[in-house]
Image (cartoon, grey):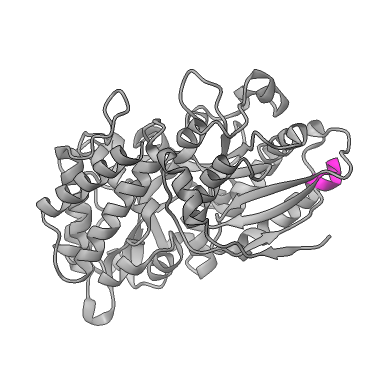
């Protein structure tokens, strides 16, 4: 077999504008991808007659510490699939920063990949474009049945009442990671409230030594949107009304985002340089793993990223992101993760369904989720990444069951990511200059974000 490394430029602005009413983007960094015409297998039970001379194009998300890491993990699995079915797969790993805009451009032009991963928070927005293949009863049967999926993961596939246009692939939730040794040396316990977290961060922050209480990729749009949603939920609020209309300028949302950006602007427990971290994982992972920061809000898959940098599982602990005193702990996270979808204009729908069945088979779910440190989305599959650390598995399972809710399932949620995530990034940029954003600044940024939503939809 051969591997091609693809370089993809960003999507042209004109194409983004064509799809602006269907929302915007947000994520990691610029593109280099691997392309792998492969050989694949699925489990024998999921196999079909070989499909000679069929090549599927596949956009995979950057789940690992780097794009090269994803190519290394996915290549042998795609080889299995080709060996089993005769179907080639051309792999392109797309950074999160490019993915949504690329998908919206594909929806506008009618030209897209056969199969694509997507952030599950964008599932409803992408479904609204009408450009993706619906998983009706027949499609679910072709991939092994709807009942094989974990209910909470399947709940992210799309809005209720319609066949979804994606199915789950990797499941994650957010938590607060903390450095056990740094906490022990300072005589601190893991925080249970936001106020305790900030107090601990102040004790642990030593700017003259380059050590900070908390690190975050504060220049990343999608992470900023995630934390805006979480802090709003912890305050008992939502960015959308019951009918799905944007409601960004509400007290819960203003105060939630205020306390998040205060970590840098007022509390001064976050390095101002974090405002330049536009990669959703890399630099902040490194700061945490190397002891330059004591705490970090990160998703489940961060455990493997830290391992690759050299931090062992026993060096850090995880707890739910602390809510403020009297806050709503059921909003400490949300059910995040990665789904997989089929482009409606594919010339190979049957082969694409075979590939989705393979990727969501129990065998592949165990292999891939172990590699990425994520949680399987199908039933009765062991979370092998945590086999040696049952405390971590229990913690993640408890957060998923008790401290997480789905992101609002509305068609405009991707525009929420772009506009609110962008607003939070701009507030951190202000904080990094030494000018702490006030409540009036936060309110003005959210008013502008809501006006942009109205103008583009």
Residue 246, how many percent across, how many down? 28, 34
- Please state if 68 lies on the left or on the right of 453 as rendered: right
At a point 78% along the width and 38% down the height, the residue shown is: 43
Q: Is residue 357 visible?
A: yes
At a point 67% along the width and 48% down the height, the residue shown is: 58
At a point 51% along the width and 69% down the height, the residue shown is: 309
Residue 211, how many percent across, how many down? 28, 74
Q: Nearer the viewer, residue 404 or 127?
A: 127
Which segment is the magenta one?
Answer: 81-87
Q: Which quarter of the rendered picture does the N terminus lie within?
A: bottom right
Residue 156 magenta-highlighted:
no
Residue 197, how many percent across, how many down? 22, 55
- Please state if 351 lies on the left or on the right of 231 as rendered: right
Q: Nearer the viewer, residue 17 or 329?
A: 17
Q: Nearer the viewer, residue 172 or 96?
A: 96
Q: Is residue 171 visible?
A: no
């Amino acid at each position: 077999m051969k591997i091609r490394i693809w370089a993809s430029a960003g999507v042209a602005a004109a194409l983004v504008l064509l799809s602006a009413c269907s929302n915007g983007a947000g994520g990691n960094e610029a593109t280099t991808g691997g392309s792998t015409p492969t050989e694949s297998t699925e489990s024998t039970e999921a196999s079909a007659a070989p499909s000679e001379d069929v090549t599927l194009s596949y956009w995979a998300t950057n789940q690992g510490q780097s794009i090269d890491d994803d190519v290394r993990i996915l290549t042998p699995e795609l080889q299995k699939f080709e060996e089993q079915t005769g179907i080639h797969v051309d792999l392109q790993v797309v950074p999160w920063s490019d993915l949504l805009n690329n998908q919206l451009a594909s929806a506008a032009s009618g030209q897209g990949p056969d199969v694509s991963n997507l952030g599950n928070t964008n599932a409803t927005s992408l479904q609204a474009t009408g450009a993706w293949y619906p998983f009706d009863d027949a499609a679910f049967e072709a991939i092994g049945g709807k009942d094989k999926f974990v209910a909470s993961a399947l709940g992210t596939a799309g809005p209720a009442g319609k066949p979804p246009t994606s199915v789950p692939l990797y499941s994650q939730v957010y938590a607060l990671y903390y450095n056990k040794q740094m906490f022990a040396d300072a005589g601190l316990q893991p925080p249970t409230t936001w106020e305790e977290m900030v107090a601990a961060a102040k004790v642990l922050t030593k700017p003259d030594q380059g050590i900070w209480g908390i690190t975050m990729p504060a220049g990343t749009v999608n992470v900023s949107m995630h934390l805006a949603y979480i802090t709003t939920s912890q305050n008992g609020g939502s960015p959308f009304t019951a009918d799905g209309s944007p409601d960004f300028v509400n007290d819960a949302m203003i105060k939630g985002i205020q306390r998040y950006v205060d970590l840098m602007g007022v509390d001064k427990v976050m390095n101002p340089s974090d405002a330049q971290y536009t990669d959703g994982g890399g630099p902040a992972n490194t700061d945490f793993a190397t002891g330059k920061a004591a705490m970090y809000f990160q998703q489940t898959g961060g455990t493997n990223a830290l391992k690759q940098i050299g931090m062992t599982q026993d060096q850090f602990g995880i707890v739910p992101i602390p809510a403020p005193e009297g806050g709503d702990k059921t909003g400490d996270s949300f059910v995040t993760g990665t789904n997989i979808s089929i482009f409606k204009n594919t010339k190979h729908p049957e082969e694409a369904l075979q590939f989705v069945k393979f990727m969501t088979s129990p065998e592949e779910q165990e292999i891939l989720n172990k590699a990425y440190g994520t949680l399987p989305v199908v039933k009765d599959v062991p979370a092998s990444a945590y086999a040696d650390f049952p405390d971590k598995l229990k913690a993640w399972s408890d957060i998923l069951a008790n401290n997480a809710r789905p992101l609002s399932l509305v068609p405009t949620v991707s525009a929420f990511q772009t506009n609110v995530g962008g607003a939070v990034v701009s507030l951190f940029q202000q904080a990094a200059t030494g000018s702490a954003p006030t409540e009036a600044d936060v309110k003005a940024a959210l008013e502008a974000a809501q006006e942009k939503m109205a103008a583009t939809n």
